[in-house]
Amino acid sequence: MKALVLALLPAVALAAPPPTARRISALLIPMDQGAESSTVKLETYMNEALEQFSGFTVKKPEELFGMPADEEAQASLKRGTKGLEESLAAYEAKEYEDAERKLRATLKELQGAVGAMRSCTELCEATALYAAVLNQRGDIEEAKLNLIDLMALNPTFELSTKRYNKDFISLRAQVATGRSSVMRGSATVKSRPAGARVYVDGEFQGYTPMTVGPMQVGKHMLRLDRPGFRQHGQLMEVTPDDVEITAELTPTSNYKKYDAQLDKVAGEIVRTQPSPAATSLGKSLSIDRGLLGTVKDLGPNGTELVVGFFDLQSGKKLASRRVVLQGDEYGMAKAEMGRLVNYLVNNGLGGGEKKVKASDPLENRHGMEDWNAEDQGGRRQVTEKKGKNGDPLDGVNGTEDW
């Protein structure tokens, strides 16, 4: 009977309600134009690392400041979808002139709806249908140009044999093996402000400013997302000559309020006394804890981060550290941000909240623990003590707490 009671105890413990999670977010402030491009990426890495901790509810910047869709693009998508249905009905009724007229208007709407699209389903279907209508009336060269655009948007787009005749499907195969199908170009994508996430044909590419490519010549869907700004989308034409695109992003009202507080917050991050600006920021964003930091572009010397872990209800800084990143090859920046977050949280809470442990014994280990005698939280693990030899720098590895 006693064994039965003991066996049930773990289940009872697991059923206990969890404590109220503290709302937390990582917010970085670019201190120069060069640092602006890396801020969103580093914030993303830090918030992903925070999600590994129990006791926290991570509020991402897009939740705090909003990232609204383009309403005009959404309206265009709605009209374009309806136009595609009407165009398809006319095509299947073999009313090709009516179908062509409807498709011209439909394509115009869909080209203005890129900001609201996550895939080219409607645009690709309309492009294929328009090419088929052109081929039906004997305008072969114009049909080929539209098929080039279709392959650029989606190289694997399938043409239905029930909808399209053999001649048109053969024309698609001819274009796919032609000279135009192997031509490539690149696009340099910029935004104001920099640091927007870049999606081309629905696939994430990186952060502005960046060069995307090489890509097949023709039309491609470009979408830019940056927390605190309205989403931006457009159809870009890629040619053998590199093209450059610059987008002006529109801030939300919440981001404007946040931006007005940044100078005060940045000035108080390095202070040891409670920060009134941090308290005010936490209240305006409705978060309890925050990893607040500044980012500076050091040119060839890397990127400098000064980050503090704050209790935003009192403004008290619980822990802080300065790090310098030397590039982002092989995911180095993401790994470094994970170690930075672990250090700040573990030291700031004094072990009060533990990281969620995975079943994999090698989880969260990066192979360098024994080399610098630190775990990801910056705590010493070496138990064997070395004797003093009189060298004041003995045992100093240059990564001590800032």
Image: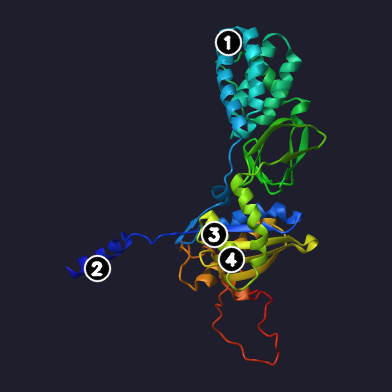
Of the numbered discs 2 and 1, the one sitting upstream in the chain is: 2
Closer to the eye: label 4 or 1: 4
Return the residue nearer the eye: 55 or 192: 192
Q: Amino acid at mark 3?
A: Gly
Which disc, if any, is residue 6?
2
Query: Which quadrant would residue 99 be assigned to in this image?
Result: top right
- Which mark identifies residue 90? 1
* Inter-mark Cα distance, 3 to 1: 57 Å
- Is label 4 or label 3 in front? 4
Instruction: Report the residue marked by disc 3.
Output: 282
x and y percentages locating residue 95 in the rendered image: 60, 7
Query: On the image, numbered disc 4 is attached to which residue?
Result: 276
Amino acid type, residue under disc 2 in the picture: Leu
The residue at the point 67 percent across, 67 percent down is 323
Q: Secondary structure at mark 4?
A: helix
- Look at the image and tell me whether residue 9 can be seen: yes
- Mark nearest the camera among 2 and 1 is 1
Out of 307 and 168, give the one closest to the viewer: 307
Q: Secondary structure at mark 1?
A: helix
Q: Earlier in the sequence, mark 2 or mark 3?
A: 2
Q: How many marks?
A: 4
CB atoms of marks 3 and 1 within 8 Å: no
